Image (cartoon, grey):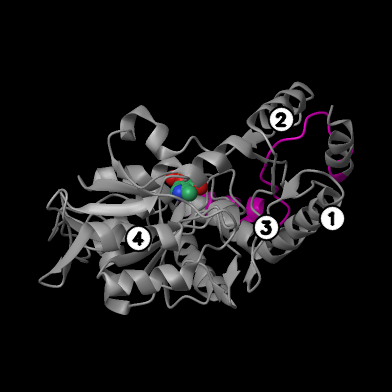
Amino acid sequence: MFENVIQKIKSLYPRMESIPLHAPVFRSNERKYVNECIDSTFVSSVGAFTNQVEDKLKELCQSNHAVVIVNGTAALHTALLLSDVKPNDEVICQSLTFVATANAISYCMAHPIFVDSDEKTLSLCPKKLEAFLKENTVQENGACKNLKTGRRIKACILMHTLGLPGHIEEIQKICRTYNLEFVEDAAESLGSYYKGKHTGTFGKIGVLSFNGNKIATAGGGGALLLQDEALAKKAKHLTTTAKIPHSWEFSHDAIGFNYRMPNINAALLLGQLEFLSFSIKKKRDIALSYKEYFQETPYQFISELEGTISNYWLSAIRFKTPEEKNEFLKVTNEQKIQTRPLWKPMHMLDIYKSAERTSMEVTERLYNTIVCLPSGVPND
Ligand SMILES: *Cc1c(COP(=O)(O)O)cnc(C)c1O
C-alpha cells in the first residue's frame, strides 16, 4: 500500500537512505561566522552577531523592531508578559498547536482557553472564537471578563500552523472588539505572508523560533517581532535581566529574565538567514511538487489560502480515515521515511484536560487524518 506515494517522496529526496521530516542544511557562511565568534571570545549574551541578526530579521520581516531570544518558548513567555498577562488571567489559543504555546500561558500563572481550528488553515477558527466570546464574556471597565470564571481574558494567540498563515484580519478584528491583546505565534512561519505582509508583524508582538527543525536554525533560538519602539526597549530590558546599563555596576530595576540569545547561536543563525530566500524557494518547490502529485490521488494536500504565501515549513496531506492515516505513518516510518502526525491537541493532554474549551470537532478530525511529509531542503 502507498507504494506510489513512497516512490514520489523518494524521488524528491534521491540517494538518501533515510529521509528525515526536516533536517537543517548549512551551505552559507555558518562555519565562518561561528569561527569568527569563537575567535572574538564573545560567545555568550553580548556580541555583534546578536545585533546583526536583529537587523537582518527587521529587514526580512519588514518589522520595526526585533529582539533575539534564547528560544521560541521563552519568546512566547516574554510576549505574554509584555501583553500584561497577569497571574489568574486567561489567554485564548488554539488546541491544535505545539505545547509551547499553551505552556507559555501557564508560565505566566494564567489559564489557557482552547478554541477549535478551522478546516482550511488548521489554525484558530475566527467563527468559533467570536461565538465563544459572545456567549461567555462581558466587557467590564475596558476588560473582557469571562462570565463563568469571573476572570479577565487578556490575550489571544494565533499560531500559523505548519507555516500556513491563519485568518489574521478576522481574528485581529475580534480581538479589537473584545479588548484582547493579539499575539502571533509565528514560530513556524518565518517567510510566510498574509496579503503581502509578513506573519508576526500584524499585532504589537509576534514570535519566531529557530529550533533545529525550523526553516532557519540557531541551534536553539527565538525572536520577538515588535512594532512599537517603547515596547521593543522593554522587551530587550526584560530579557537581559532588567540590568540598568552601566560600565561596571550591577543594578536591576525589575525581576528580569536571562532570555537573550547567545552570540554563538546568532552567528550560526546569521549564516542561515543569508540564504533564507533560497531555502523557502526550495521548500515551496517541494510543496508544489507534492501538491501536483496528490491532485491525482484520493489524498488531499493542505494548500495555502488565496492571498497568502506559506513557507510550507511542513507539507501535509489529509486522509479520509484515521485507519488510513495510521497505516501510512506505519508503512513510511518502517521504510525510514520520517512522517509525523500533528501534535496531540492540547485539550487531549492530561496536563490541560481540565482547561476551558470550545467544542473540538474540527481539531480532532484534523489530528486524526493529517500526516506531515518530509519537507526539508534537499541537501544537494
Ligand atoms: C517551534 C515552536 C515554538 C517554539 O519552540 P522552541 O523550540 O522553544 O524554539 C513555539 N510554538 C510553535 C507552534 C512551534 O512550532
Q: Which residue is mark 3?
A: 29
Number of residue marks:
4
At label 2, the amino acid type is Glu
Q: According to the image, label 1 marks what residue?
A: 292
Depth check, front residue: 244 or 81? 81
Residue at horizontal 14%, vertical 58%? 252
- Nearer to me, 24 or 43: 24
Q: Which mark is drawn over residue 324?
A: 2
Q: Position of residue 51 (x, y in %)?
A: 45, 67
What residue did someone put label 4 on? Answer: 131
2 or 4: mark nearer the eye? 4
Q: Which residues are magenta?
A: 12-41
Q: Main secondary structure of the magenta part?
A: loop
Q: Residues within 10 Å of mark 2 (few under 14, many from 20)?
A: some
Q: Earlier in the sequence, mark 1 or mark 2?
A: 1
The residue positioned 56% from the left and 40% from the top of the image is: 365
Horizontal side, residue 321 vs residue 200: left or right: right
**Residue 223 point in image, percent of width and height:** 43, 59
Q: Secondary structure at mark 2?
A: helix
User: Alpha carbon of mark 2 to alpha carbon of mark 3: how far?
Assistant: 43 Å
Q: Position of residue 277 (x, y in %)?
A: 69, 66
Q: Marks 2 and 3: CB-CB under 8 Å? A: no
CB within 8 Å, label 4 to label 3: no
Q: Quadrant of residue 29?
A: bottom right
